[in-house]
Structures are given as C-alpha cells and as structure tokens.
Amino acid sequence: MKHFTAIVGLLFVQTQLCVAENTITQEESTNSDAQKNIREIVVESSLVQRNYSEISNPVHIISGAELENVGTQSLGELVDSKLGIASSDYGPAVGQPIIRGLSGPRVRVLHNGLVIRDVSNLGADHVNDVDLNSAEQIEVVRGPSALLFNNGAIGGIINVVDGIIAEEDITTSEFQVGAESQSVNDGSAYNFSYKANLGGLNVKLAHKTSDFGDYDIPIGALAHADEHHDDGEEPLEDEEEHHDDEATTLANSDYELTKSKLGISRVGDWGFAGISYSESEVIMGIPFHTEPADAHPEEGGVHEDHEDERIFAFTDSSKFDVKGEFNLDNSVINNVMLHARVSDYMHSEQHAEDADHDAVDAPSDEHPEHEEGPTVFSTEATEISLNFNLAGAQSHSIMLNFAEQEASIIGHEAFMNPSSTQEYTIGYFRSQKIAGLDISLGLRHDRASRDGSVTHHDEDHADEDHADEDHADEELEIDTYNIDKSYTSLALSVSRDITEALNLKMGLARVSRAPADVELFINGPHLSTGRFEVGNPNLDTEQATNIDLAARYETDQFFAEITFFSNDVDNYIYLQDETEEEHTTHTAGESDPHMGLTLAEYLQKDATLTGYEIELGTSFQFWNGDLMMSVARDSVKAEFNDKTHVPRIVPSRNIATVAYNEDDFNVRLLLKDVEQQTNIGAGEQATDGYTMLDIDMNKTFSVGAKTAFNVSLFANNLLDESARNHSSFVKDNVPLPGRNLGIKLSATF
C-alpha cells in the first residue's frame, strides 16, 4: 500500500498545478444531473459496445448511480435483488454470485472484461477480489450465452466496470469525497476519487477504506444444531431460558478493507493505450469454523466453541493491467484491442486469542493454543487477450486468449496440493440483422491443461502420533496428474421486433466446462465448511445444452417481460455430503480418516435445470416526477436424471419494487419474499422462507455549476427478519444480518 500512496502523492502535487486549467462546464453539470434519473440513461454494455435495449442476450446492468445509493455490500448482495441472480454468503464480506441456480466456477466474475483470478472458488469463506468503489456499472449476463465473453461460464458472468483506464480523453477534472455509516455493525467507510487530464495524460485514481464490526442478528436467529424437537414436542424449561439469553451479535463477522487503484492512459486518433495498478487489503472474521476431532481429543468429536478466540482471515492482492485499442481501418481489420493482466493474490487464515478483535492487523506466527500457524492460499496469474474487430457492415470479431495460473495452499489446514493451469482460447463473434432478425453468434474453442497431485493418507495410521516426519513420509502416497481437456462451445441468439412494443427472443447454446482444480485435486479437511472434501481427478467435462425463450412488451406506461429457460447439463459436477447414517458409521470406529468431519465428495451426474423469470410493471407521472411499480418472480428447479434434487439450489422468490424519481431526488422500496426451500438434495435440511424489506433514498444538492453534494439514506431488513440463505454452506451458523440503517454522504467538485 505504501507504493500506491507515494504515487498518489506525486500525482496530487501535479494536480494542484493543473486543476486551475480545468473548469466544469454547464453542459457537463447538466449531464451529471441527468444521470441521477436512471430511467433516462441510455446504458451501453462494455462487453459488446451496444445499448442495453439492443442486446438480445439476457442482461442486467446496474448503473453507477444505483451503486452510489446503497451501502457497502459484497458483490453477491449487490446483485441479489435482480431476477435470476442470488448470493451464497459467508458473512457480510463474502457473497459469491449465483445465476439461475449455478455457482462456483460456472459463474465467472470479471473486472473490465478479464477474469478475476483469486481463490474464491477454493473456499466458501473467500471473498471475490472486486473493487466496487467508483464503479461505473456492473453487467450481468445470465445463462450459457455468456460464452461470448468467457470460457466455461455455463451459469453466466458478472463484469465490474470502472473504466480505470480511460478510453476517451477526460475533458473536465473531478474530485469526489464520501463517507458512510451503518448501524447493524457500527461500521464506517471513507472514499475519494479523482480524474483529470494532466499534460495530455488521462489520470484516474480511487481509494476506499472501511471498518465494520460484528453485525447484529435478530433474537432467535442462531440455530442450535443439538436441539431437534419432534412435531408437538415442547422444549425443556432450561432450553427456553437458553433461547431468552441468546446472542444478538454474530461473533467474528467483522471486516476491514482498504482498496486503491490508479490508471493512466493516452488517447489519440490512433486509439488509446494505458496502464493501471490496484491493490487491496482485507481483514475479516470467520464466523464459522470447525476443528477436526483429533485437534481436541479431550473433548471428543468436532470442536465448534470459539467464544474465547479470534478466527480471522487476511487477504492481500494486487493487479497490474495494460490495455489498448489500435485503429487500423483497413479492408480486413478495423481495430485491435489488447488487454493483459498480471495478478497476485494471498489469503491467510489463522487463530488469535483476541476476543475483542484488538491489535489484529496481519498474520502472525505466534499462536499460544494453535502452534500450527496460519494457512496461506495464494495465486499468481497472467492473462492476455487480443480482440480483432473485423471490417464490414456487420459486427464480427476474432478473439485470442491465454491465461496461466499457479495456485497453492500452505499450512496446517492445506486441503489441496499446489496446482497450475493453462488456458488457450480462440473465439469468433458475429452480430447482424437479417430479414428483420437480430442475430448474434458466438463460437469458441478452448483448451485447459491442469497439473496437480493428490496426497493419500494411510488410514491405518490415522489415530497415531504423526510428529515423526520420517514416519509421516512413509504413510503418504502422492499421485500426480496432467489433465488436458479440449472442447468447443456454441451460442446463438435471435430476436425480432414484432411491433414497436413487442420483442421476442430465443437463445440456443451448447457450452462446455473443464473441471476446476479444486474439483479435481482437493483431498482434506475443509474446516470453513465443516467437511472433509474429496475431489476426483477422473471427472469429465461438463456439457450444457441451453434454450432461452423470452418476450418483452413495453409502452410508455406499461412493461412486461417473461423468460423461460431449460439447461440440460451432462456430467454435472456437484459436492455430495454423506448421510447421517454414513457419518455415524465413519465415526463409530477407533480410527476416523475424516477427522470427525462430514465427508463430501465431488461426483458427476446428468442434471436438468429449468425455470422462469417474470416481471410486470407500470410507470407514470406522479406529482412532480415519475412513479414506477413492478412485481416479479424467479424460480429454478434442478433435478438429476434419477429425479433426486441438486443440492443447495436457491428457492423461488417474489420481488416487488416501488420507485419514485423527481429530478435530483430518488426513493426506492424493495420487498423480497423468499419462499421455503423443500426441494433438497441428499444430506440437506429444508430452509424456511423469509421476507426482506429494503428502502433507499437519494437527494442531490447543486451549488453553482461546479459543486454537488449527495445524501443517501438506506435501510436493509427493515422488518428485522430472521433469515437463512439456503445456498450457503453455513446457513445454520451464519444467519443474515438484522435491521440496518445507514447514511452515505459525498461531495463532487
């Protein structure tokens, strides 16, 4: 972080010399005010450089103005209210997106078009390494049509766009500062951003720091795994007293983050070229953590009581990007886009005897009761993408991509040996109008090569002392693998305007995905999920055949959209928990190779996911502004071909929205009714439904043509509902936060 601070300091000095040369024109101020009314913005997708209304693929675009009106949230929380999109949370800092019931490596998270190669797929408690500060928009592509933008994205993609490398000259300088406060966690956040053209160079920088404590939960929200009452059975008197004294704060649910980024570019008739650097530090509590039975033999079984100790994670990451577009304007190629990134990511988990969370700033090797020290997850990755925009009346391009990644886990809780991955891609995209049809075609061929190994422990020695390294080496057996997969994917989407108000769409796709390294090589205790997870190096490539049918009707006062989808996935990869009977059998003997944890294995079986997304709404002039009201519903059903249910699938949801926009004032009320999930897989428990009521409002005050002040008020879970996320691995132990009231202030000069 000190390197970034030094660079910012030098730039700030130069800024003071140049800022007098840049004034904000009245035209720019008018454009800024217009952006406050989201419905008036013509939003363009950075992925295909086309307006939202012209894109035939199922897309959500969350504008920067909408992001400014809500409190600091995880990526999953931000997209959770959009149709077909959900989140698998692990406390407030972690929210891994789910698209149409698909998650993990089937959903790719991008930053400015390139994959974020962190370790979020290695653990449910790992954050997505995204910086949402000063983001211009978030783009979500649902379904396998996302293959147009990345490989293996059977579920879809989420692209965070911040334009840190300016592709057009910045004509006016702008400096923004902001502050935020939240009640549910006594949290605060501060940020600033700056952009200007200094001596012909476009400069953008942004910084944010946040500090959020343990969050409040409704009374009775904590589950008691040891208390199961049959229907009609009354709880014991002491159990009732225990519930009365139940905690209203979730321990180890705090987090702090510091994120900074800087971009510099040059623009000319020839195109643009630029570089950017970003770094991030996060300290977060781990609200759920198990320990193997042999870690506390005197207590017998799995130890889960951590009231007197601090369990936390420290992450440190950096990214360096080079990006440019070069105009050729010849008879074959219009322009060439180059984007390269080098990233380095570290995530460390450890214990600290510090229940008050004081003086815990970074990993330490001193652990009075945990001499094993921290477990460190790390990745180093390089990715290079070339996009050739071909000449012609229609839009078509050829894409080449190469990515290389090294992943390792070192420490007492390492559950996977180091692995390396190389990916090669050649793709072709074409879009044009034929006989009134808007047709988009995507074709790509991918090759993924993964090198890894699996260590097998001799179960006969599971209960013996392993302190002797020579003896430990004798009982280990390591199998090495080089797994090379090649596959071709195809997506076709067709849309047609039947009338000025009615549009019909159809999407067809055949998308393949190679197994991820964690699905192949994991073999050990994964304590953040309470499981002993076992991969399978013999897993085959997933192949998804998808069809989307959609109709959209829109007039001046009424809009409606309905989408049906069916996704047949051959060789669907899933994590299967053992049953209670199987777990009892494993733990009954003198030696338990799974250390008292639930055995979970990566398996394959053909599966079918079907569902729909419906939204109806109206908008009309009301008072001095516009009032919009809508009701929506999304639902997905996921079954294996043997009619059993796929585990951890999101339940059906009903979403009602009321929004009022009047010049520089906006208010939105969102009611989300999540239904009970009873379609459960083997080893799962049903999850009750819940209702979330959120409200946010925003007001902008302009002071002349150069200064604007913005005030946002927000309230989440206003009903203080006790809620659990069915798709979360830790739903019983990590409920969703209680009522949260917050305020955000910002000033733009």
Image: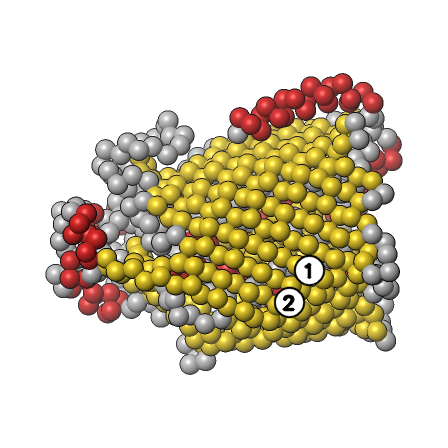
Q: Is residue 497 visible?
A: no
What residue is at 74 percent from the left and 41 percent from the top?
Answer: 273
Q: How far across and down, in percent of the image, does residue 397 sit?
A: 75, 61
The quarter of the rendered structure image containing the C terminus is top right
- Reading the image, the residue beneath label 1 is 399
Q: How far across and down, in percent of the image, does residue 258 sit?
A: 52, 33
What residue is at 29 percent from the left and 63 percent from the top?
Answer: 599
Dot 1: element: strand
Position of 571 compared to 507: left or right?
left
Q: How many marks?
A: 2
Q: How far across and down, in percent of the image, does residue 414 sit?
A: 33, 50
Q: Which mark is residue 444?
A: 2
Position of 4 compared to 572: left or right?
right
Name the kind of residue labelled 1 in the image. Met
Disc 2 and disc 1 in contact, CB within 8 angstroms: yes
Q: Dot 1: few (<14), some (14–19), or many (≥20) neighbours within 10 Å? A: some
Q: Is residue 277 visible?
A: yes
